[in-house]
Image: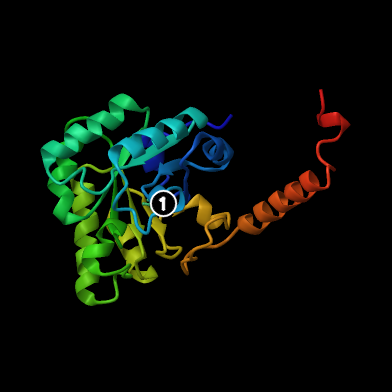
Amino acid sequence: MTKKMTISSIKKTKGVRPLVMITAYDALFAKLLEPSSDMILVGDSLNMSFAGKADTLSATLEQMLYHTNAVCNGAQNSFVVCDMPFGTYVSKEEALKNCIRVFQETSADCVKIEGGADKAEIIAHLTSNGIAVCGHIGLLPQSVRSEGGYKVKGKTEEEHIQLIKDAKAVEGAGAFCMVIEGVKAEVASEVARSVNIPVIGIGAGSGVDGQVLVFSDMLGLFEEFTPKFVKKYLDGAALVKEAIQNYADEVKSREFPQEIHTY
Ligand code: KIV
């Protein structure tokens, strides 16, 4: 059994080795990912790949609590991150109330909050009240409607400077690590170098302190679209479809069930 990561052991990986983070939404996959990952993220991306919605915005706190419990049940030896959904951390008070629910109703180890310097006050309120926070800067999926799409960040000098400010503000507010999403690789590396906590990238190149991918993307299960930064480690959709077709064919031909499947 691998040793469960802690906030302290996660921080100590900085400059030593890259962190491995993968999303999971249920106990079944969480158990499969557990042996190879440092941290499991119950991402609000579940609203797309699990619930079939167009973006993450309609994910609810109830949904996140349900799926976080499922993941914690399946991977009891994993460090679990619960993504706070859109609209649940608009003020310090709301954020604390909702994060306390996550800590009381699940065994998640921390929450994840999207936003940089603009969310520093909220993150500081959470961390000073016993909530461990993983930040999330760069491309923020919860801002997809207000920004009119998923826009890669760090392309201009202004964005570059802002990203460094965001990372420093998130660290200063007490976050123990952060995700950086959809950022030009050279800028993301500089952001990682500008702080003392691990910066875990998704679509942010290889110069950061770890990588996170959505499990259904990296297993080739999500067919709607494949972002440029995703590497498919399995052609999951094709394999699943083939298996289901084989089952259907065998049911129709009465090849299944055989003697060994029969009482
Ligand atoms: O919701 C999610 O899966 C995420 C990752 C894209 C980092 O936030």
- Horizontal and vertical percent for residue 90? 15, 46
Quadrant in which the N terminus appears: top right
Considering the image in quadrants, where does the C terminus appear?
top right
Image point 51% across, 34% down: which residue? Answer: 27
Q: Quadrant of residue 257?
A: top right
Residue 153 vertical placement versus 49 (above, below)? below
Residue 139 visible in the snapshot: yes
95, above or below 14, in the image: above
91 vs 180, left or right, is left
Residue denoted by label 1: 15
Q: Is residue 242 left or right of residue 100?
A: right
In the rendered image, the vertical position of residue 91 relative to residue 5, given as above or below:
below
Residue 106: image x %, image y %? 35, 28
Which of 205 and 23 lies nearest the eye of the viewer?
A: 23
Question: Is 179 on the left or on the right of 36, as rendered?
Answer: left
Instruction: Where is residue 175? Give x, y as percent.
Output: 26, 43
